[in-house]
Image: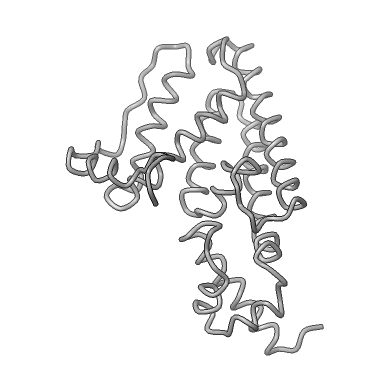
Amino acid sequence: MLRSDARENLDRILGAARQVFAEQGLDAKLADVAARAGVGVGTVYRRFENKDALIAALFDSRLEVVVEKSRAALEFEDPLEGLVWFLDVSTQLMADDRALRDLAVGGPATPHAHLSQATLDRVEKLRYEVHEHVQRLVARGQAAGVVRDDLDATDIGLLSSTLQAAVDPGADSEPDVWRRVLGLVVDGLRTDGVRTPLAPRPLTEPQLSAVMRRVKSPADPK
């Protein structure tokens, strides 16, 4: 059983880590976590042997939330409504937490040297569970005639990545601009020809130029 001061330090470290990883993503440093918690780096290492151990402690439950959301989407009577709801809530979850986005969207294909194979395997397992739920939603939507019949569950994964790509660049000027992209995505899924109202307002040309300057291609120098 932890002493009260040790428990307090642990709670401060975990609280700080949630904030730092949410802001900076998986590349955040343990020194930043320690500084935010108001403790020494050595105190962090006494509780967690490395960054992977801290990430595993923080994000297993967070990833489970994404899985639960995909499972909850199956409860919708209208499968298209469930699919749209899942895209909305999962994008919002990851818009609020860069590290969760790194894990859920990047996953094992994203090179994070500090993550153990056990952690990557766990992420892949949870991603597969989400895929299975989405696959069932898509099949139901196609059987009901409300989702285009050439759609595949893997397309939803690509569309989710597209939505996530719209999160960071617009964060400073228009944090919800990804919802416009979601509206366009929804219109591409449905079969009834209904058009989704796009909100919020579109970016101005100067805002778009600023976004494009921030988005680097893989070949760009760091």
Pinpoint residue 93: horizontal percent, then vertical percent. Answer: 52, 48
Pinpoint residue 139: horizontal percent, then vertical percent. Answer: 66, 17
> How has the structure been colored for display?
one colour
- Residue at (55, 36) in percent of width and height: 86
Q: Is residue 77 left or right of residue 28?
A: right
Q: Residue furthest right?
A: 1
Pinpoint residue 159: horizontal percent, then vertical percent. Answer: 50, 29
Q: Is residue 171 left or right of residue 154?
A: left
- Determine the image quadrant of residue 197: top left
Q: Is residue 206 above or below residue 116?
A: above
- Determine the image quadrant of residue 109: top right
Pinpoint residue 131: horizontal percent, then vertical percent. Answer: 67, 31
Q: Is residue 130 above or below residue 171?
A: above
- Residue at (47, 11) in percent of width and height: 191
Q: Nearer the viewer, residue 13 or 199?
A: 13
Q: Nearer the viewer, residue 131 or 191?
A: 131
Give the number of marks. Answer: 0
- Residue at (38, 37) in percent of width and height: 179
Q: Nearer the viewer, residue 83 or 60?
A: 60
Quadrant for the N terminus, please: bottom right
- Residue at (24, 46) in percent of width and height: 210
- Determine the image quadrant of residue 108: top right
Q: Is residue 153 above or below residue 8?
A: above
Q: Is residue 197 above or below residue 46?
A: above
Q: Is residue 52 left or right of residue 190?
A: right
